[in-house]
Image (spheres, helix red, strand yellow):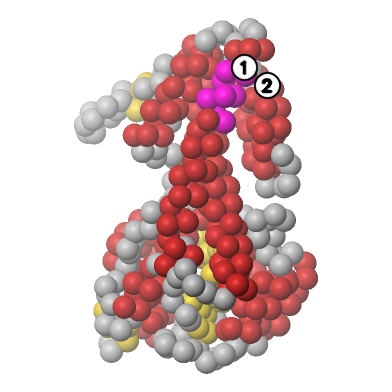
Amino acid sequence: MKQHDMAFKDLSDQSRNVELLQRSLERGRLAHAYLFAGEEESPLEGIARTLAKTLNCLNPVKQSGVAIDCCDQCLSCQKIEHLNHGDVRWIRPESKSRVITIDQMREVMQQVNLKPTEAEYKIAVIVGADRLNAAAANAFLKTLEEPPARSILILLTLEPQRVLETIRSRCLRLNFAGSGQPKPDPAQLAWLTSFSNEAAIEQKSLLARYRLLDVLLKKLAELKTSIDETLTARSPLQRYKEVDKDLQEKWEEELKAAVEAEYRRQRSNWLLLLEWWLRDVWLCALGEGVQRPKPKSQSGPENSLLSFPQLAAAGRIAGRISAAAAQENLRVMEQLQRWLYTNVQEALALEVSLLKLSL
């Protein structure tokens, strides 16, 4: 995953929440703990990084003499951007159990309670706060109730309803939700076109269904390889060859966890893309997949309820299944996403789900 330099001024799509954060900064009323909720982890992480940069920027943008945005260029900003600032800690679910453990939280709480070493604030960003296990959540409550001075805790989640109520109530919650409509890049759209065309072929034989599964598995394998290569290249293991064995093992575990977490996030996005396409199939089956003329006052292409009106395969599939079967496809995909949150074997979950789809 490529990170992009970012300041608050670049977040025009989240202007309401950005304005609230900047007003809090200007008035010196920043909360000790925030819960950022949204539809994707990557934008939430970007906002958390930007807040961390603004608080610790060496050359900030000021209003009324107070920092309200970062310069995004100084050494502190660049360290935070590249996740190697000593006073900004990131905690993610572990790779095997996919939970944040009490040991992880004890370590970060110990760090947060120390004075900053090179910055104004100690900051801890908890990615996937809904994955705190019971012991970790209860231990963390003590820190939330009595936060150390000059510290900010930022919790990120895609499922705020799964965060312990006692934690939610002690955080200022901001919802960074987009329109929900997918915005695939050219590579994603090309792959979805290929998948949908394969799916539109009459799926009468088991072999045809397994060919479709192979298209998905091949994409996910490419995805994992790409993430592994990107994060490995960015790991301190590549920069520091001669290090203590314990530190090397710690970095290896962190890299493994980061690769797994990023793969799960991106896999979820690809499956969500499929789900939106299956929604098009459902709309077509309902007879709602037609284009509607725009009002005369508006220019441009005609309106359509479809997410991917350029993909004709949805209409071909809708012509041979019922609206009820198309709707059931959406339930299958939602169930698949829930399964993949657990320790279920990925290949088996994908196989079972694709065989259940009506195509």
Badge 1: how crowded within 10 Å, few (<14), some, or many (20+)? many
- Horizontally, is 83 left or right of 160 in the view? left
Q: Between residues 248 and 280, which one lies in front from this camera angle?
A: 248
Decide whether residue 215 is among the magenta residues. Answer: yes
In the image, taking residue 98 as reference, residue 154 lies left or right, namely left
Residue pushed farthest front? 242
Q: Is residue 308 magenta?
A: no
The amino acid at mark 1 is Arg
- For disc 1, the marked residue is 209
Inter-mark Cα distance, 2 to 1 = 7 Å
Q: In the figure, 294 relative to 143: above or below? A: above
Q: Is residue 168 left or right of residue 102?
A: left
Instruction: Compare marks 2 and 1 and give the one earlier in the sequence.
Output: 1
> Decide: marks 2, 1 in contact (CB < 8 A)?
yes
Rendered location of residue 36, percent (x, y): 53, 64
Q: Up-down: is 318 above or below 219?
A: above
As helix, strand or loop, the secondary structure at mark 2 comes to: helix
Q: Assess disc 2: are there few (<14), some (14-19) or many (≥20) residues with their C-alpha within 10 Å of its C-alpha.
A: some
Q: Which residues are magenta?
A: 209-217
Tell me: residue 157, above or below residue 320: below
Residue occupying the point 74% across, 64% down: 133
Closer to the camera, 111 or 305? Answer: 111
Dividing the picture into quadrants, the one containing residue 188 is: top left
Residue 269 position in % (x across, y down): 51, 42
Please say whether residue 130 is visible from this viewpoint: no
Residue 94 visible? The answer is: yes
Q: Please identify the quadrant where the C terminus is shown.
A: top right
Label 1 SS: helix
Question: Which residue is disc 2 drawn over?
Answer: 355
Q: Amino acid at mark 2?
A: Leu
Report which quarter residue 67 is drawn in.
bottom left
The residue drawn where x is 34% and y is 74% is 77
